[in-house]
Amino acid sequence: MNEENKASKNKWSRIFKKKWFFPAVYLTVAALLLTVVVWYQNMDNQIPDAQEDQENYVPTPNDEEAEPVLEQQEVIQMPLTDQEQAEIVTKFYDYNAEEKDQENALVLYNNRYYQSTGVDIATAEGEAFEVVAALTGTIDEVKEDPLLGNVVVLSHENDVKTYYASLEEVSVKAGAEVKQGEKLGTAGKNLFGQDSGTHVYFELRKGEKHVNPEEFFNQPVSSLESVQEEAVDNKEADETSEPVEEDAVENDAAEENGDEEEAPEEEDAPSDEEEDDASNEENNDATDESASA
């Protein structure tokens, strides 16, 4: 037994004397400590199960009064599928535009020029193309015009309307609901805009006002509110100018009355001249009688 104990002690003593023994022990202890620290941190940061959160969730009173998220507004698009190939051959007539743009906004028909209230859109190749809805809306009217070709009118939210003319074929009917980008028909030719070739005539209206579509392409529908505000300001300006016009009318009436009052004096002037002529004749008669005597 003593020999066996001595042999085991000699083995451990030889192990202790190894150079790698103590570094190995230190590394093992450090690894254990690091494992314990990481495990403890994961326990503190552990996220509760989603199902447990739903079971323990209690709605607060503020949730019921929360405002709904605003719906994303549509962006006004050109009325054709391949917008990169689109080319505006006739512009909208803008009184504030440059002279060149105003010339491009005049339509010659029957030896007379007309100001365009929309735009003529064609492709670079001049070929026929599908005409689509620029915005989601309801089809108000589908008709055939002898000068403009087939016409489709759509109404949208916020008192906005879009107008499509020079259509060769029409794929929709009045009263139908259409989504943005849905086909309305195909582009064609018409008599009024025959210089534009195969095209679609497109108008954008806010209330009763025609607006320049080029300024609002790729813009949200809410951008048209500025047009309405401008129209209201112009209306208020017209109302404030009405009293001035009334004063001008009253002044014109007063001047007319003054002219009428002065008219009798002008009529009296010939009577004075007649009296002078009569007195001159009497004097001449008296002179003649004295000469004869």
Image: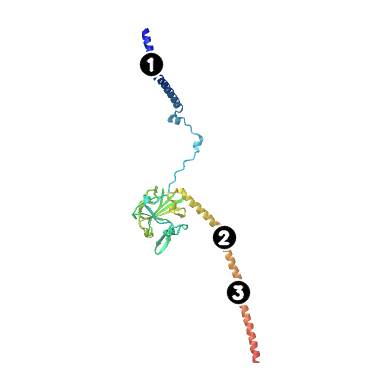
Q: Callout 3: few (<14), some (14-19), or many (20+) C-alpha neighbours within 10 Å? A: few
- Tell me which colouring the rendered structure shows: rainbow
Marks 1 and 2, how far apart at CA = 116 Å
Q: Label 3 amino acid? A: Glu
Marks 2 and 3, how far apart at CA = 33 Å
The residue wearing badge 3 is 266
Tell me which residue sits at (39%, 14%) in the image: 13
Dot 2: element = helix
Image quadrant assignment for residue 285:
bottom right
Q: Label 1 amino acid? A: Ile
The residue wearing badge 1 is 15
Mark 1 or mark 2, which has the lower sequence index? 1
In depth, the one of 264 and 226 nearer the eye is 226
Callout count = 3
* Whether residue 172 is visible: no
Q: Quadrant of the C terminus?
A: bottom right
Q: In this view, does 245 lie to the left or right of 22?
A: right
Residue 111 on image: x %, y %: 40, 64
Residue 53: image tag:
none
Q: Callout 1: few (<14), some (14-19), or many (20+) C-alpha neighbours within 10 Å? A: few
Residue farthest along the top direction in this orientation: 1
The residue wearing badge 2 is 244
Q: In this view, does 225 lie to the left or right of 279?
A: left
In depth, the one of 257 and 288 nearer the eye is 288
Q: Callout 2: few (<14), some (14-19), or many (20+) C-alpha neighbours within 10 Å? A: few
